[in-house]
Amino acid sequence: MPAVSGKKLFVGPRFRRIRQQLGLSQTQIAEGLGISPSYVNLIERNQRPVTAQILLRLAETYDLDLRDLATADEDRFFAELNEIFSDPLFRQIDVPKQELRDLAELCPGVTHALQRLYAAYAEARQGETLAAAHMADRDVGTRYEANPVERVRELIEANRNYFPELEQAAETLRDELNVPAEGLYAALSARLREKHSIQTRIMPVDVMRETLRRFDRHRRQLLISELVDPPGRAFQLAFQLGLGECAQALETIIGRAGPLDDAPRRLFRITLANYFAAAVMMPYPAFLAAAEALNYDIHVLAQRFNSGFEQVCHRLTTLQRPNARGIPFFLLRVDNAGNVSKRFSSGTFPFSKFGGTCPLWNVHSTFDTPDRLLKQVIELSDGTRYFSIAQMVRRPVAPHPLPQPRFAIGLGCEIRHAARLVYASGLDLEKTEGTPIGVNCRLCERENCAQRAEPPITRTLILDETTRRVSSFAFSNAREL
């Protein structure tokens, strides 16, 4: 949100998004702000300004950090638009950065549509050969289906990774169970048995060698592999309860997403049930209070809530309740080949949707130091600084001689929040030099990077057989048009 001053501001789309994030109607927010519903309507249509007094009243009434709520989506949309328009497809179109920022701010719906179109184009381009091989088996009228994983990620981002209906249901369940964290598994097992006639069984690995959880509908049994650790077992029971007891809430949330193909609909339901399970294990009020009191010490939080390191990190990205918000974290999960299998951002970190991550970010170094938590200040090319921590996790155990699955978890926040973290204790964050990284190689324009895997798509590649540089690629300083 622009700085609050004496001038009038036309910020209708941002005002509307704040209202929708609060779950309020125009009439309700008008009552809270002491203005008429018709004036709210005019504000949201950019036909009336929002005065500084109204902004301050909005912040005080709903205990909002307007800077966080208003700019996170716009910064993310702008970063994604910048990535899209850096593609050689638009080489002959010089779109000023300010126009992209205006589009992200004033027309979020159009921005979202462009993201969907480009994602479809990119996936179709990358899979052109495979798609051609399958076209004979498809009806001519079959429309293109977007990647369901990306579609669900978009839906999570649109909800800022926070689902109040599921939070309330999880808190209600924990209140009814009324057990400490160490007694949660037994209580959930009893709930499944007594209320749903579902028996929980821990199965030996030779019976469930390739499956970690399976629900046998006919025998009414929930089977869990012995390879799943105790936090994972409680999570799987809570997941099953979520599918059963929160079915209506799940369908309501899914319905708000609009028309969905079968694959993204199913994946979204699974994702929401996972969200519910984490909320059951780490109830919002207790977890937020503990996180603040412990300065976000992840290992202690994991012990207190009988959860895993990754579970806690993921849960920290969901603390976006109005009037009770935690630090807006971003999270990344990668394997040792750099494949991204999970990414969430409740802040402004510009994850790339069409490529990997920067190798200079020490999240990749955790595989060399598996028992250490790494800290780092990172700085993007636009000067934005972030504080991140990273650690390798093993999940779940695999029987010999199968390879043991390993992932790196990176968790971070804007540098302005870092002082609240125990991991930044003793660091002079203003003087600590940030490691210069890029979103990924194809979008990074930093020169002489020894880790560069490909030239930036926004620059012309220079080939010179007489010179060998530190970087494998040399490129022009001028942007391609």
Image (cartoon, rainbow, N blue to C red):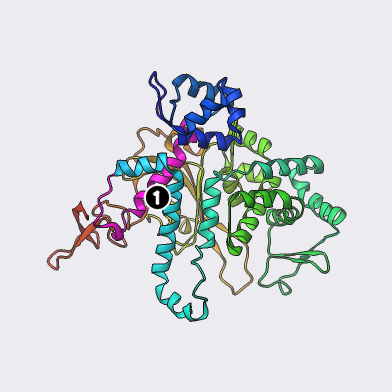
Q: Position of residue 30 (x, y in %)?
A: 58, 25
Q: Position of residue 238 (x, y in %)?
A: 73, 52
Seen in the picture, residue 123 relative to 114 is either above or below; the reply is below
Say which quadrant the C terminus sits in: bottom left
Specify whether 433 is left or right of 247.
Answer: left
Quick check: can you spot residue 462? yes
Q: Nearer the viewer, residue 26 or 312?
A: 26
Seen in the picture, residue 174 relative to 292 is either above or below; the reply is below
- Which range of residues does the magenta coloring cover? 67-96
Magenta span includes 73: yes
Q: Secondary structure at mark 1?
A: helix
Check disc 1: other Cα within 10 Å, few if <14, some if 14-19, many if 20+. Answer: many
Specify whether 449 is left or right of 157.
Answer: left
Q: Position of residue 428 (x, y in %)?
A: 40, 32
Three-letter code, disc 1: Glu
* Residue 6 picture quarter: top left
Residue under numbered circle 1: 80
At a point 64% along the width and 49% down the height, the residue shown is 253
Magenta span includes 335: no
Q: Main secondary structure of the magenta part?
A: helix
At a point 66% along the width and 72% down the height, the residue shown is 210
At a point 44% along the width and 26% down the height, the residue shown is 48
